[in-house]
Image: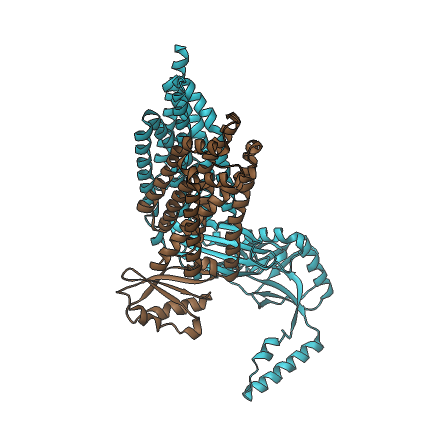
Amino acid sequence: MYVIKHKNFFLGVIGALMLGALLLTFLWKPNFSIEFTGGSLIEGVYTETRPPVDTINTYIPVDKYGAFKLQPVGEKGLVVRLRTLSQDEHGQVIGLLSDGTNIFTETNNSTIGPSIGRELRSKAILAIAFVLILIIIFVAYAFRSAGRVVSSWKFGISVIICLIHDIFVPTGIFVILSHYFIGYEIDPLFVTALLAILGYSVADTIVVFDRIRENIRMGSSKETFENLVGRSLSETYVRSINTSLTTVLASLAIFFFGGEATKHFALMLAIGITAGTYSSILLASPLLVLISGKKTN
Amino acid sequence: MLFNMAKKRITAVLLLLLGVGLGYLVYSTQAPGSKWNFKLGLDLRGGSQLIYKADVSKIVLGEVNNSLDALRDVIERRVNLFGVTEPNVQTQTANVGVVGTEHRLLVELPGVTDINAAIALIGQTPTLEFKTERDPGERDLILKQIEDIKKKQEEGKDVSAEIANIKDPYYVDTELTGRFLSRSSVEFSQTGQPYVSLQFNDEGAKLFAEITKANIGKTVAIYLDGQPISQPTVQGEITGGQAQITGGFTPLEAKQLAGRLNSGALPIPIELIATNKIGATLGEGAFDKGVKAATIGYAIMAIFLILWYRLPGFVAALALAFYSVIVLVIFKSFGVTLTAAGIAGFILSLGMAVDANVLIFERMKEEKKRGKLPSAALEEGFARAWTSIRDANISSFITAVILFWFGTSLIKGFALVWMIGIGASIISAVFITKRFMRAIYS
């Protein structure tokens, strides 16, 4: 199998990709939504064309309401992000935003106290860690019958590294998008997308590994592990791609035709699942051969 | 043999009819005013969401859950008083990222966009307190302090700190509060004057008996929302746990007061820590867009399946339609709340539900290549593909459960849809697809 033969090349490229995503994330520090940071968000529209952002900037005294950020939306819309406001302060800010007869009307607002932000931040990290740990344990358990050739923990470790790749790639692309476009923030839906990618991407890796497990059970002892993995991969990569393809199609349908609120979410999923598909072929199996400790050709 | 095949075909036709019937049911119950309409989440309908932190520091450890339930009940009654349709009031516990354990109350009010009115409504705590006369010595001392402060004030000094420390000169707090009230009602005296009659629970009755016994001949003041409204003189010990508030009410005032007291004082102090107002414009059309995306998504997948797998692909497309109907029926019959994320989750689950079919069909192809007859390849394909279907779905399910734990109420919708989807997809693949395929290939 081509992929297994050139495994060092593929592992190298994918490793570089992961490193790139990681570096970008730390360099360009994406914005977090107020659900994570705590704070107030006011969304609304002006009755006429929105005044220039620089003008609106002067309406809200920083010393009283703290630093804030404005984000124009369309012709008339505006989103304002501030520290956590009390109900009174919130009312005052709405009043300040109006520009003479050009009245600002609020459509949405949310205020998140710092404790909720802290909780969600911790929970997001814990949830991702839990998923990774539980999947590693589950895979190690489910593949215990393959253990007589290669420790089933190595199956688990390959799956996890693969999954880490699958969330690094969409995160990296998200960071690039958030660097160049307004409105990309790390919010609960983003974390949901990452978790959904984790839970789903593991499926097509399992399809390949399931075949390795079966071939170990059926196969002759003469075949090297490397060849066995290569054979399993060539027997299953079509279905691995096809299962993901349908889900990518579904994500794209959400992206193009679904509601506004889930557009970024669908994009992340499409990218993550695509990453999950090539990684289960180009990363998981070569990695398994590499860490199996078996002689390679 | 022939009979056997006929039986399989009849089963398949019956299944098909069942699917069409259920599909019609989903479609026909989606009408204005129908109680089987999809339940839409706050983000799709617009409304307000409030999160309160409950201060349980003064509650005995074992009593915390009971008090929180009582708190939820009281708030639920108040919200219902407001006439909100389908409000959602639930308690939540946060252990992660906060010091110790934080107890919270989540209030979701669909359709209420005036968040300040909602906050006022929930915060409207009728605090009912019973107070006894202060010792005359102490009283005079406090009155003198007040005189002193007044003088200082006249001299133009800042006395705000001192004012904050002044106690009520005439009355002292007792343990008896509205917490111990079991019921209140409006009654009329012989002269036709309305009064509010109070009935305490056992504990309250005991306290009231103690207070009245110790204060015979003196007054006991009844304070509502920090204001004295009635100061009856105690004639003798009252043991039955009954008291009256005669405050010169009009019949309407008396009725309102009794109503407010019945709706209850909050058993625990609460603090607002998050508000979220979602305008209906954001959600407007999101449901219809979701329906459109689902339809288009389904069509693209069906085309792909038929082009790639031909006849089995057509069967898979049928099974997928069956899957959608099963999931939608579950949504309707269990009243699953659909959020924007939940709708996306459903569309996504279409793509995932196909997976099992793809795995089975690929396996069948393989078995056929090895020279098996179609019917044997079919059974073998199902049996062999099962381990990978099972393991893949278990790991997805683990993730969905954790996601449910992580999520805010809007995200939980996604996790729930995912879990339902995993269950329904297994049923549709190993049960529905199998029956259809057997009818064709045996």
Is residue B289 left or right of A149 when viewed as pictured?
Answer: left
Residue A211, given in percent of the width and then of the height, sits at 47, 31
- Horizontal and vertical percent for residue B96? 56, 54
The residue furthest right is B214
- Quadrant for the N terminus of chain A in the image: top left
Displayed quadrant of residue B184 = bottom right
Give the drawing colour for chain A.
brown
Residue lying farthest to the bottom in this orientation: B155
Nearer-the-camera pick, B114 or A86? A86
> Do we see residue B335 in this rendering?
no
User: Does B228 sit left or right of B386 as displayed?
Assistant: right
Chain B hue?
cyan
Residue B30 in view in this figure: yes
- Which colour scheme appears in the figure? by chain
The residue under the point 41% across, 22% down is B367
The image quadrant of residue B427 is top left
Residue situated furthest front in the rendering:
A297
**Residue in view at x 36 percent, y 21 percent:** B13
Compare residues A76 and A297 and report the one nearer the observer: A297
Would you say A48 lies left or right of B74 here? Answer: left
The mark tally for this picture is 0
Most foreground residue, B343 or B139: B343
Q: Position of residue B358 (x, y in %)?
A: 39, 31
**Whether residue A245 is situated above or below residue B129 in the rendered picture:** above
